[in-house]
Amino acid sequence: MGITNVIKIIGAIIAIQGAILLAYPQWFKGILTFFLRGRLLYIPAALKAAIGVFFLIAARECEWTRIVIVLGLLFCMSGVAAFVMKLEKLKGMLQWWQDRSLTTVRVLVVANIAIGGLIIFAA
């Protein structure tokens, strides 16, 4: 399996996750509730940072190298930012998202689907 196929799989997972949450936006709030407990929110932050590093390493083999680099940098920065911020501030941000309406959640996950598609296309 080539490195670009792994990137396409990551893009597909992001897009499928968005499609599922578009159909069931209340699950998004349940996921946020789960990660608001303790220090569990560092798990997705570490995953985002790792995916970002992987994108940066694999970018030169992709069709649209610059897009993969930019997305890799954004993933890295958002993952690292979670470790730099205080836990209370991070939980406050998640709580803000949890307080949003289901329509706002649907708009967010449409962007998630678009980013997943862009990743697939760029690889």
Image (cartoon, rainbow, N blue to C red):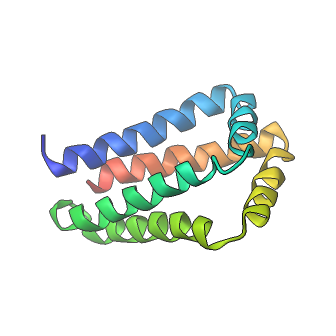
- Residue placed most toward the observer, 30 or 70: 30
Figure disc tally = 0
| Placement of 83 over or under 112, stated as above or below | below
Seen in the picture, residue 97 relative to 28 is either above or below; the reply is below
On the image, the x and y values in percent for residue 75 come to 47, 63
In front of the other: 29 or 22 = 29
| Residue 31 location, quadrant | top right
**Residue situated furthest left in the rendering:** 1
Q: Find residue 94 and report its horizontal and vertical position in percent.
A: 75, 53
Q: Which is nearer the eye, 102 or 54?
A: 54
38 or 47: nearer the eye? 38
Location of residue 102 with respect to 96 vertically, above or below: above
Q: Residue at x 48, y 68 (%)?
A: 74
Residue displayed at 73% across by 32% down:
30
Q: Quadrant of the N terminus?
A: top left
Q: Is residue 15 left or right of residue 1?
A: right
From the image, which quarter does the C terminus lie in?
A: bottom left
Name which residue lies at 84% across and 47% down. 100
Q: Position of residue 47 (x, y in %)?
A: 45, 52
Residue 106 is situated, as x and y percent measured from the top left of the image, at 70, 40
Q: State left or right for residue 56 relative to residue 52.
A: left
Residue in view at x 33 percent, y 47 percent: 120
Q: Report the side of 62 relative to 48 (left or right).
A: left
